[in-house]
């Protein structure tokens, strides 16, 4: 299906592929991202679940030209970098996962079963957004879906793994937050000392692996 | 060895800014950069720097800055208690409260801080580019001068004011536009470089759900409560709230000069008109060269 092109502002074009969260949408967003990222005048690309916002310098390029480039990139069967599988070790529960017990209680499951469900699924990185290195992951088993905290924490440590409704995610940086925190990874999801600075990328497959606190310490 | 600048008093919230960190939105990294890019560009022109040279952005109150040697500086943006919009030589700049939201201290050569992902801009919420300045910080001056300092009378400067021109947002047809365009909103104290929260007539919330998507600089999003938020330079890169409008590029600097308590209203223009306003602004800037 042809995408819908919308002039989101005088300096951006929103390319909308559909209104669902699916691997197909991700694939189309990703192809367009790689097809257009090096074009002159393009300032930033903001991927979403089923869209790509192309922000550009209107002094250098017009909406018409950006739309023509996007149409061309979308029609070509160009090759894109292969998706990777990234394993994220997580120390569940204890001080690292203060809300694990409440998640188990809410879902009517044992703590071990919550860990097993969370760490046995394969997740898909739909896109990074919101804040540096934050990955929107799809694929969490609905059996462990739990609403956010009624009152957000003032500080959630970097690496914290949380659940918010049907979503799961990892906090790349310490920040305030309302997700139910079930564990922590010793990996750095965002660091300016890494290249690229974000551990995950759009299209990656992610698996969580339960580790003990000794292995967590060994990583740090 | 380049000369230095010592921060004797940092003011309320002073950061180093250039024209922003482009090219990393797909990693969740926002543009950042000067809130009033017009003031930064004019200031850099006045002291002879390239337009993107890093300068100090002061918020609500100025600071006190001592130079190791005589330096050529220019103050632009909100009026402060020193000569504005012209280059002058000094060893010491000491400023009180600003008459607007933000002023820029541009120094010939620019401020030499390490570039992070291609930009000197500080994004305080994430620490990318460093933290706001403190008393005792010593900054090196750079070598970003590309022509002589110049001054041909106070440069052209459009009037500040609370009327922002906007184009229709991607979800503008989800809303009752009448309320939005006929109302006067007030800038909430809980506003910052990431977004300006506005208080006023509530815009009826749409029933439809939006999938999280990319958001433009200057987007006016409307959360369920109906009070609009203007996304600004330190914005999040994606969001799930529908957007009723988007501030035109030529008026983004005005957003950077709004203070808590200021009144703001919106005027709808076409994309074509928005681009004409931008061309006119660029022509006026080019005349300063």
Image (cartoon, grey):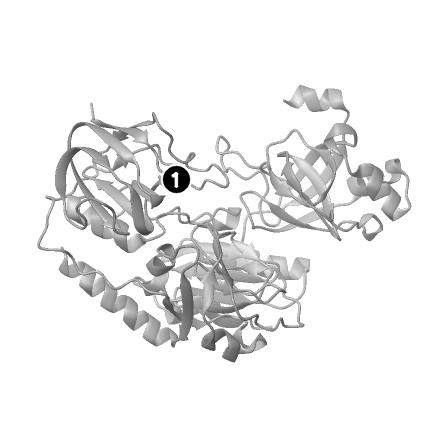
Quarter of the image holding residue A18? bottom right
Q: Is residue A78 visible?
A: no
Residue B127 coordinates in the image, percent (x, y): 47, 36
- Give the residue drawn at x 35%, y 28%: B135
User: What residue sits right under mark 1 in the picture?
Assistant: B12
Q: Secondary structure at mark 1?
A: loop
* Chain at numbered mark 1: B
Residue B20 coordinates in the image, percent (x, y): 37, 47
Residue B234 coordinates in the image, percent (x, y): 45, 49
Q: Is residue A107 left or right of residue B242?
A: right
Q: Is residue B250 visible?
A: yes
Quarter of the image holding residue B155? bottom left
Quick one: which residue is furthest to the bottom in this view?
Answer: B178
Q: In the image, is residue B125 above or below residue B273?
A: above
Q: In the image, is residue B268 above or below residue A111?
A: below
Number of marks in picture: 1
Quadrant of the drawing holding the N terminus of chain B: top left
Q: In the image, is residue B228 above or below residue B127?
A: below
- Give the residue drawn at x 42%, y 34%: B130
Q: Residues within 10 Å of mark 1 (few under 14, many from 20)?
A: some
Quadrant of the drawing holding the C terminus of chain B: bottom left
- Give the residue drawn at x 8%, y 54%: B152
Residue A149 coordinates in the image, percent (x, y): 74, 47
Quarter of the image holding residue B128? top left
């Amino acid at each position: 299906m042809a995408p819908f092109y919308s002039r989101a502002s005088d300096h951006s074009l929103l390319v909308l592929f559909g209104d669902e969260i699916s691997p197909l949408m991700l694939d189309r967003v990703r192809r367009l991202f790689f097809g257009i990222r090096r074009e002159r005048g393009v300032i930033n690309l903001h991927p979403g679940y089923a869209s790509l916002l192309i922000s550009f310098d209107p002094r250098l390029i017009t909406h018409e030209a950006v739309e023509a480039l996007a149409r061309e990139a979308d029609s070509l069967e160009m090759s894109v970098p292969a998706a990777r599988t990234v394993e994220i070790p997580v120390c569940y529960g204890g001080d690292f996962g203060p809300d694990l017990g409440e998640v188990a209680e809410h879902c009517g499951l044992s703590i071990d079963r919550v860990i097993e469900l969370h760490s046995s699924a394969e997740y898909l990185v739909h896109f990074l957004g919101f804040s540096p290195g934050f990955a929107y992951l799809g694929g969490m088993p609905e059996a462990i879906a739990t609403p956010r905290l009624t009152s957000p924490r003032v500080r959630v440590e970097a690496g914290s793994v949380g659940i918010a409704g049907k979503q799961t995610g990892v906090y790349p940086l310490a920040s305030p937050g309302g997700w139910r925190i079930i564990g922590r990874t010793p990996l750095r999801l965002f660091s300016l000392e890494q290249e690229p600075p974000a551990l995950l990328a759009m299209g990656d497959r992610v698996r969580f692996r339960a580790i003990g606190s000794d292995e967590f310490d060994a990583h740090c | 060895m380049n000369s230095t600048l010592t921060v004797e008093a940092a003011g309320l919230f002073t950061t180093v800014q250039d024209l922003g960190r482009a090219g990393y939105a797909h990693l969740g990294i926002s543009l950042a950069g000067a809130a009033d890019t017009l003031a930064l560009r004019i200031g850099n022109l006045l002291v002879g720097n390239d337009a993107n040279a890093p300068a100090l952005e002061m918020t609500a109150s100025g600071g006190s800055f001592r130079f190791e040697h005589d330096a050529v500086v220019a103050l632009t943006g909100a009026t402060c208690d020193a000569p504005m919009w012209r280059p002058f030589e000094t060893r010491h700049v000491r400023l009180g409260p600003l008459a607007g939201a933000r002023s820029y201290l541009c120094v010939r050569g620019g401020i030499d801080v390490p570039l992070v992902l291609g930009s000197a801009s500080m994004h305080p919420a994430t620490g990318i580019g460093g933290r706001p300045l403190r008393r005792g910080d010593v900054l090196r001056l750079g070598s970003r001068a590309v022509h002589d300092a110049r001054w041909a009378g106070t440069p052209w400067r459009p009037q500040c004011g609370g009327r922002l021109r906007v184009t229709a947002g991607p979800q503008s047809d989800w809303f009752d536009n009448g309320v939005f365009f006929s109302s006067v909103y007030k800038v909430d104290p809980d506003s910052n470089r990431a977004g300006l929260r506005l208080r006023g007539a509530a815009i009826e919330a749409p029933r439809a759900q939006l999938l999280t998507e990319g958001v433009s600089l200057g987007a006016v999003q409307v959360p369920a409560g109906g009070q609009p938020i203007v996304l600004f330079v330190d914005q999040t890169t994606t969001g799930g709230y529908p957007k009723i409008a988007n501030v035109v590029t030529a008026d983004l600097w005005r957003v950077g000069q709004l203070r808590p308590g200021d009144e703001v209203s919106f005027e709808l223009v076409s994309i074509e008109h928005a681009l004409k306003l931008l061309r006119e602004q660029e022509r006026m800037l080019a005349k300063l060269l």
